[in-house]
Amino acid sequence: MKLAVIGTGYVGLVSGVCFSDLGNQVICVDNNPLKVEILERGEVPIYEPGLKELIDKNKAAGRLSFSYDTKSAVEASDIVLLAVGTPSLPNGEANLSYIEQAAKDVAEALNGFKIIATKSTVPVGTNEHIERIVSEHTNFPFSIASIPEFLREGSAIQDTFNPDRIVLGCLDQETLNTLIELHKPLTSNIITTDIRSAEMIKYASNAFLATKISFINEIANICEKVGADVTRVAEGMGYDQRIGSSFLQAGIGYGGSCFPKDTEALIQIAGNVDYEFKLLKSVVEVNKDQRFNIIRKLQEALGSLQGKNIAIWGLAFKPETDDIRDAPAIEIIEELIKLGANVKAYDPVATANFKLKVNHSSIKWCDNALETASQSDALCLLTEWSEFTRIDLVQLASLMARPILIDGRNVYDPIKVKEASFIYYSVGRPHSA
Ligand code: NAD
């Protein structure tokens, strides 16, 4: 099939590349000329394991190309996938300006019947809004569909090729048949539904996962007070098939480009129809506070943080990505600076993006994990990159001014950390001095 993917970000680029690998002819479009230039040079504008190799392979096979020009890409395609961003507005609602512009650009480029399918996460009713925009700007026939995306950054290729399910929201049977054909090589678990339900499935799924995270974080906070170990509690819960073990890792809360904005957007979607989503409001509130447990633990260990040297390991919102959108590290570092600490920070791939968001003279950017920890009064692990989890703890302790380790992701074995003479704080486990 011939596809144009509008928006070459974390979702559009990965989806486009994977569809080309399945034998489709794909043009990935972005209105940011810099991104297109980078891709045309053979480089990749984002960090995603395995992506470069897959791009090279499919470019060489002549199935994949990049363009700045929506018009020619749409003209050459039968299916147009919209994958532009839908970031939060200040009130939490989804900003639909990018999707509206993309819909208009596509409409003006139509030269015959096309399927226009939205992969971006959009509030319920948005695809009908897109349909109206397109109709206002073209006389050519077209059909609308919602195909919400569930990939996770860091394992995006694996997720795209092995999805738990594909949701196709569409009422036109012929369009549905084409979209089923397109997705059939990925999974047999294809759920077909109406467009509004498809839009809601995406928000409900993310809200539920966020709820699991905030739930286990609250259990962890109680565990700290009653002397229980949340990792054992989560293990014991997770064996219950009605609960499941995923998303029960206590930590400093969720971040990233999806959960924070999608939970806020769902609260607004509910509010717009006079429904107060009390549960989800609490999930968001719990998450916002959870990251500050790092600061509270630092203060418990060190007293005032004024003039203290604090090392930070991990800036990305999760490992295996350079995405720092809504990463807990942003607020934690800003708070440390406010409290007068000197911050040394390191991330294997996300430092450049982070510097664009937070840059301050009290932050020293480091090139490796041990240099960051050296001579610091405390070390905080915020992202569980494997290079941090594999570190030699005895050597690490010997480099620090004070061996205080605040583990925001529960990656270390408390016994081994104690053997290395650390004063160790983790999340929801008894702290060892
Ligand atoms: P992103 O910001 O990485 O990429 C969006 C891209 O669209 C940018 O490169 C931007 O330049 C481009 N763009 C904007 N307007 C355009 C236009 N008119 N024409 C051409 N290009 C245009 O965003 P993302 O993380 O890929 O997310 C895209 C959507 O997918 C969002 O709605 C998001 O919620 C959803 N989603 C994201 C993830 C994820 O893990 N990132 C997972 C599932 C769903």
Image: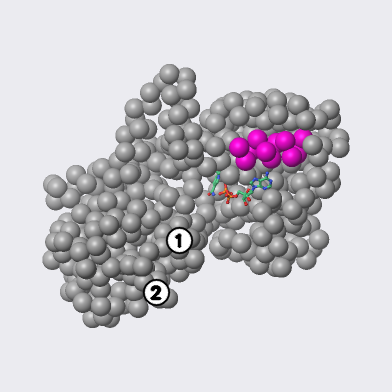
Q: Which type of secondary structure does the marked residue at label 1 adopt?
A: helix
Residue 93 is left or right of residue 145, and the answer is left
Residue plotted at (20% across, 54% down): 296
Q: Amino acid at mark 1?
A: Phe
Crowdedness near tag 2: few (<14), some (14–19) or many (≥20) residues, C-alpha within 10 Å: some
Q: Position of residue 40 (x, y in %)?
A: 73, 64
Magenta stretch prevailing secondary structure = helix
Crowdedness near tag 1: few (<14), some (14–19) or many (≥20) residues, C-alpha within 10 Å: many
Residue 100: say if magenta. Answer: yes
Q: Name the mark on residue 366.
A: 2
Q: Position of residue 110 (x, y in %)?
A: 82, 37
Q: Position of residue 346 (x, y in %)?
A: 39, 69
User: Could one spot residue 193 in this view of the protein?
Assistant: no
Residue plotted at (16% across, 61% down): 304
Q: Amino acid at mark 2?
A: Cys
| 245 or 121: nearer the viewer | 121
Residue 375 is left or right of residue 158, and the answer is left
Question: Taking 281 as reference, is 257 above or below it?
Answer: below
Mark closer to the chain start, 2 or 1: 1
**Residue 55 occupies quadrant:** bottom right
Q: Seen from this angle, which residue lies furthest right?
A: 111
Q: CA distance from mark 2 to mark 1?
A: 13 Å
Question: Taking 122 as reference, is 6 above or below it?
Answer: below
User: Could one spot residue 422 in this view of the protein?
Assistant: yes
Residue plotted at (74% across, 40% down): 105
**Residue 61 occupies quadrant:** bottom right
Magenta-tinted stretch: 97-107
| 7 or 173: nearer the viewer | 7
Residue 109: say if magenta. Answer: no
Mark 1 — residue? 354
